[in-house]
């Protein structure tokens, strides 16, 4: 599989702020990668450097195997950045027409209006659109050149829930055709719905990189709950391999550990009397909070709870 993006030891220093700190990342063609991190983590700076809009202080970036500034590369890239600036005096359809004219392999205006769900607004002035509609126009413009790599920086801010769901469906079908998508979002549900890989950034560094399941499992917060027989004690469960905590309420017990399959296996192998078994996986939100908290508390030297080698 080819690399769509290769970032090697990239840093960006702004006056006295290191926004991105020796970051290395490789993204395969055809993947949907969510870049997550708290405000100021360095996500937008990273995207702007990949796009060639911001110059790295050090390190190398390749986009589709070449410099992001090459014209042949730009023709295959689409970006929906945080600020969508519309052109005063142009209607929605005219704005889309204008953007299409910059590309050699553009999608049709009608297709772009349909994808962005802006057919009803096509004759409105772009400046008269609502915030959420402007985001959708930004999406249409990002897709205008039928890009191979699409960057979405907090794409659904201001969109209502229906627009957001339509947007997710569009992104999924777009990705299904082999396109690469890099997404930043503060809506973890969005990453959970779309991404096949999650990269978590904090203070300009990558602190975790893995599939959704790997990231979710990283908290060690999974648990199995069941109802135990009369003779089963919490101490007995706590001694099982991989169990980190046991909480009991009456006969109902929650047994915590990183690997719920291993816990269940031990329960059965030790003939512990249980029934009504339920497995609870932690969500992306829990995992994200815990990764950020642990990286903040460990300081700079001690990163990477999960690391994936690509
Ligand atoms: N042009 C600039 N000049 C000086 N500092 C900057 C500049 N752009 C970004 N920064 C700083 O670099 C750091 C990273 O900013 P960046 O916008 O990349 O973060 P982010 O992860 O995208 O945040 P958010 O989620 O809030 O959009 C922040 O501390 C920010 O204040």
Image (tube, rainbow, N blue to C red):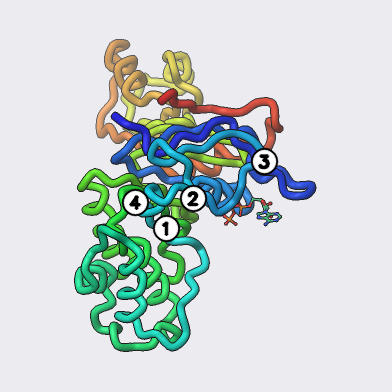
Note whether 28 is above or below 262 in the view shown.
Answer: below
Image quarter in which the C terminus is found: top left
| Residue 307 visible in this rendered orientation of the protein | yes
Q: Earlier in the sequence, mark 3 or mark 2?
A: 2
Left or right: residue 40 versus residue 152 is right
Q: CA distance from mark 1 to mark 3?
A: 22 Å
Q: Quadrant of residue 119?
A: bottom left
Quickly name the residue at label 4: 76
The numbered mark at residue 57 is: 3
Classify 10 Å Cα crowding around label 2: few (below 14), some (14-19), many (20 and above): many
Q: Residue at x 29, y 29 (%)?
A: 1
Q: Quadrant of ligand 1?
A: bottom right
Residue that lies at the very extreme toward the top in this rendered image:
270
Classify 10 Å Cα crowding around label 1: few (below 14), some (14-19), many (20 and above): many
Task: Residue 165 in the image: state x and y as whole percent.
Answer: 29, 63
Q: Earlier in the sequence, mark 1 or mark 2?
A: 2
The foreground one among 218 and 150 is 150
Q: CA distance from mark 1 to mark 2?
A: 8 Å
Left or right: residue 201 versus residue 190 is right
Classify 10 Å Cα crowding around label 4: few (below 14), some (14-19), many (20 and above): some
Q: Earlier in the sequence, mark 1 or mark 3?
A: 3
Quickly name the residue at label 2: 51
The local secondary structure at tag 3 comes to: loop
The numbered mark at residue 148 is: none
Quickly name the residue at label 1: 79
Q: Residue at x 32, y 31 (%)?
A: 2
| Residue 222 visible in this rendered orientation of the protein | no
The answer to whether marks 1 and 2 mark residues whose Cβ atoms lie closer than 8 Å is yes
Task: Residue 260 in the image: state x and y as whole percent.
Answer: 36, 26
Q: CA distance from mark 4 to mark 2?
A: 11 Å
Left or right: residue 126 versus residue 307 is left
Q: CA distance from mark 4 to mark 1?
A: 10 Å
């Amino acid at each position: 599989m080819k690399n769509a993006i290769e970032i090697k030891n990239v840093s960006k220093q702004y006056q006295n702020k290191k926004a991105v700190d020796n970051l290395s990342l490789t993204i395969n063609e055809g993947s949907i990668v969510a870049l997550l991190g708290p405000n100021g983590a360095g996500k937008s700076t990273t995207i702007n450097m990949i796009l060639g809009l911001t110059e790295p202080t050090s390190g190398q970036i390749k986009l589709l195997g070449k410099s992001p500034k090459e014209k042949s590369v730009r023709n295959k890239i689409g970006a929906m950045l945080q600020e969508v600036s519309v052109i005063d005096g142009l209607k929605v359809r005219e704005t889309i027409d204008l953007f299409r004219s910059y590309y050699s392999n553009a999608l049709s205006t009608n297709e772009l209006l349909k994808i962005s769900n802006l057919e009803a607004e096509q004759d409105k002035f772009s400046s008269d659109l609502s915030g959420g509609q402007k985001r959708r126009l930004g999406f249409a413009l990002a897709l205008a050149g039928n890009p191979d790599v699409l960057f979405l920086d907090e794409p659904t801010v201001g969109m209502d829930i229906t627009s957001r769901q339509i947007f997710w469906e569009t992104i999924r079908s777009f990705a299904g055709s082999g396109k690469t998508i890099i997404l930043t979002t503060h809506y973890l549900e969005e990453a959970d719905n779309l991404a096949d890989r999650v990269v978590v950034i904090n203070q300009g560094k990558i602190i975790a990189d893995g599939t959704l399941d790997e990231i979710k499992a990283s908290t060690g917060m999974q648990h199995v709950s069941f109802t135990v027989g009369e003779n089963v004690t919490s101490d007995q469960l706590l001694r099982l391999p991989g169990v980190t905590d046991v909480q009991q309420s009456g006969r109902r017990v929650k047994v915590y550990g990183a690997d719920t399959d291993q816990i269940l296996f031990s329960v059965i192998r030790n003939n512990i009397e249980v029934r009504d078994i339920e497995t609870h996986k932690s969500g992306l939100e829990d995992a994200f909070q815990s990764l950020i908290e642990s990286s903040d508390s460990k300081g700079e030297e001690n990163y990477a709870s999960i690391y994936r080698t690509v």
